[in-house]
Image (spheres, helix red, strand yellow):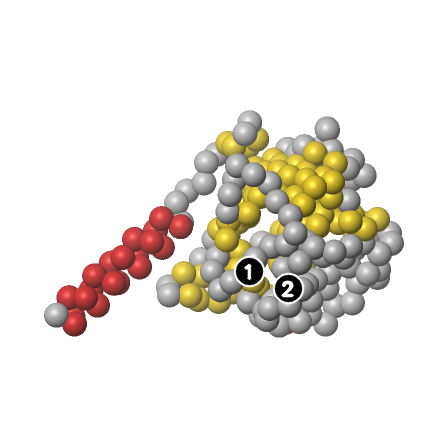
Amino acid sequence: MFRTCLLLAMILATTAGAADKAEPAKEFEGLPLVFSEDFEKGADAWTPTDAKAWKVAEESGNHVYSLFQQSGYEPPVRSPKNISWIKGVKVSSFVLEARVKQTGREYGHRDFCVFFGRQDPTHFYYVHMATKSDPHANSIFLVNGAPRVSIAKERTGGTKWDDQYHHVRVVRNAESGDIKVFLDDMAKPIMIAEDKTFAAGEVGFGSFDDTGNVDDVRVWGK
């Protein structure tokens, strides 16, 4: 009986993993697929601010990209310290999707971030998904040669983190400046902004000063 139950559990786990690794659509909302990553072959396509803070970790036979400790990196202006950028991917209008899990302790600024529009270390946008909203948390931020500034026109009161993976989507229209962020519910954004400061740039993931994992990254864009 025990062997039968164990075999059934292994089959279900394998099936779930296969579902997570389904091939992404070649086109989404009129944009072509420009990047796809499941970390099953490592993380050679990524450039972290501190390689010692990131690793490919295994979870029940599945591999994820893990920000497991604080980076030694100190940004030139007040902005997140823990970032890993996708090499050679620079997009203007785009749709980005991934599974993310926050692995730090619970407190008001417990966060995980998505970065985009990067020009250099002091010019980029980022989405800061944190437990509670305030002038410095749970918003869409602009880093423009100075400490980050919140630019969200609409946002929720906070992002509830737990020990599970969550589906994040960021949609950016470079022509209109519209930026929308979704978490789990793809029908209702948790944040909205409008800004045209950077027309195109690099994309990445990380945290201001916490830890977390990312997997199944997809980017459709121009």
State how far apart marks 1 and 2 are (Cα).
8 Å
Residue 95, image x, y percentages? 59, 38
> Callout 1, which amino acid?
Trp
Q: Residues within 10 Å of mark 1 (few under 14, many from 20)?
A: many
Give the left or right position of residue 39, taking residue 222 as reference: left
Total numbered circles: 2
Give the left or right position of residue 13, taking residue 216 as reference: left
Dividing the picture into quarters, in which one does residue 210 lie?
A: bottom right
Image quarter (top left, top right, bottom left or bottom right) of the C terminus: top right
Q: Residues within 10 Å of mark 2 (few under 14, many from 20)?
A: many
> Callout 2, which amino acid?
Arg
Secondary structure type for disc 2: loop
Residue at screen point 36% across, 48% down: 19
**Residue at label 2?**
110
Asked whether residue 138 is in view, the answer is yes
Please name whichever residue, 144 or 148, is drawn nearer the observer in this view of the structure. 148
Residue at screen point 39% across, 45% down: 22
Asked whether residue 49 is in view, the answer is no
Q: Is residue 93 above or below residue 84?
A: above
Dots 1, 2 in contact, CB < 8 A:
yes
Residue extending farthest left: 1
**Residue at label 1?**
161
Dividing the picture into quarters, in which one does residue 154 lie?
A: top right
Residue at screen point 37% across, 64% down: 61
Dividing the picture into quarters, in which one does residue 53 lie?
A: bottom right
Residue 80, image x, y percentages? 73, 60
